Amino acid sequence: MKKTLALLALAGTLATGAASARNVTLLNVSYDPTRELYQDLDRAFAAQWKAQHGDTITIQMSHGGSGKQAGAVINGLPADVVTLALAPDIDAIAARGLISRDWQKRLPDNASPYTSTIVFLVRKGNPKHIRDWPDLVRPGVQVITPNPKTSGGARWNFLAAWGYALQQPGGNEAKARAFTHELLQHVPVLDTGARGATNTFVQRGVGDVLIAWENEALLAQKEFGKTAFEIVVPSVSILAEPPVAVVDANVAKDGNRAVAEAYLKFLYTPEAQAIEARNFYRPRLPDVAAKYAGAFPRVKTFTIDQLFGGWRKAQAKFFADGGVFDQIGPGS
Amino acid sequence: MAGRRRVLPGFGLALGYTLACLGLLVLLPLAALVWKASGIGMAGLLHLLATPRTQAALRLSFGAAFIAALANAAFGLLVAWVLVRYRFPGRRLLDALVDLPFALPTAVAGIALTALYAPNGWLGQTLATFGLRVAYTRLGIGVAMVFVGFPFVVRTVQPVLAALDRDMEEAAESLGARRAQTFVRVILPMLAPALLTGFALALARAVGEYGSVIFIAGNIPMRSEIAPLLIVQKLEAFDYAGAAALGVVMLGFSLLLLLALSLLQRRSRRWAEQPA
């Protein structure tokens, strides 16, 4: 018996050694603003894997609103990995049995290799003198943020505003609710996604301030030049942790588990972390973060676990049907 | 009467084919929709309908579509009239342009309209000086709906108008009818069935329109949120039964509207064919 096992193992090693020039195709289903990021990451990973194992890896990308992407995977899009904007979208896939429920514990740092935060983008010269959250609710200030029901980024925006108000001296639940309600009444256009909101603000010239992902704001600034827009960092913001996971049911079917897991682990390596930093995502590794410290403004952040008891609670309380957002959103 | 030959042989085959096509392409997806919606139950459906936000979205979708279809009926009739009754250079080009809204992806139309009517857009800037805002208001929704529904009325009225006997108009004139009388009592009744068809098509198109409206609408709940957006929101919250139920509600309303219009059309046809 032992002998057979040993033989089998030997045969297995020989087989993998012999079939060295495999072609592997991975499908990474991601959210909207990561197009540029994963272009660079995929190239680096494919090169590294080729050097180490000899296989040719092709990584196909699919981008779209985070919730819509999760829905596509639930409905059968054969994603090997998902790299989405927020944990509830991966939870929704897990709830349908496609991903193990403990997915967030399988990788370090809540399974989010990079982070971002929420900042303000204002027009050149900051004509409305926007410095911090309270400035957004001054009379005559128009705020652009997408609909949290359809946009992952907008949920971070909402929670950042709520969290700010909650942490003020004398802050409490009622005050946070009042502040966020007031803020949402300053929103003239509720886009369905983060990119749509950026377009409304940048291209259509609507609104005085865009609440945005830091990576999206830095990218807009890179595309349109520092002269057109300015980034304003509020006194406190949320630490946004976009998570990643292997889709267990799909990798089991196409036998890509090893590559898919290596791909996600690669995102935590110094090489990948540097790519992430260059694409305006904050790296987790302290020495990479130190190297790129100049690229990111200093900001005091809180996490969703600290203030809201995790995503599962926050999702149910704020964004479920009839939840807080439905009660205090624009037009209420 | 075996001599009564039809142009196409094989009535049985043709009917069978028609039914199979209709069944596969139209009825099957609709049945799937109803089946998916049944997950929500009667109580869930009533609750959904009782929500002010659902009501506001439905009212907006159907109301704006109705107004847009009315505008298209008037404007389309005028365009059809010009294209049929007058000869002028560029007429053929104009005629070809009418169909463009059909060919354009609706998202492209939406982005183009928004760019044009946004506060910093060319038309938006000018209109803003008169205090008129189009993009991100209900007016914008109407504009997008007029755009996508425009070809229907023109294309339904045009052939009827072209085939219209001028003798009737001349007879009316010789009997002493004024121009307005000729138009309202002679021409309009004959055009009414085609006009109603065009109106119904434009209405149906506008009710279901998503792609172009979404860019120009502003999408603020209770104010500028159309019912199809509410469906998409339910889908993105993984509430498939709720989304399907709202779809069925829209379908039901549309069906009622189209039935009413076809009844009206039947009556108008009888009216038109009545010996005067």
Image: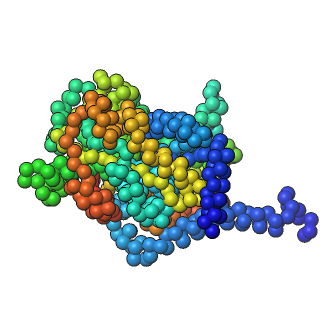
Left or right, residue A232 beside residue B174: left
Q: Which image quadrant is residue B2 in?
A: bottom right
Left or right, residue A158 beside residue A59: left
Q: Nearer the viewer, residue A197 or B53?
A: A197
State whether residue A206 is above or below residue B54.
Answer: above
Q: Position of residue A273 (x, y in %)?
A: 38, 38
Q: Which image quadrant is residue B261 in?
A: bottom right
Name the residue: 55% across, 56% down: A251
Q: Nearer the viewer, residue B125 or B156?
A: B125
State whether residue A176 is above or below residue B5.
Answer: above
Q: Position of residue B267 (x, y in %)?
A: 58, 64
Count numbered badges in the picture.
0
Q: Nearer the viewer, residue B13 or A82?
A: A82
Considering the image in quadrants, where does the N terminus of chain A appear? bottom right
Res A5 seen here:
yes
Name the residue: 48% across, 65% down: A97
Name the residue: 49% across, 56% down: A247
Q: Position of residue A122 (x, y in %)?
A: 26, 32
Left or right, residue B59 beside residue B257: left
Q: Position of residue A86 (x, y in %)?
A: 36, 52
Q: Which image quadrant is residue B222 in?
A: bottom left
Furthest toward the bottom, the residue is B42
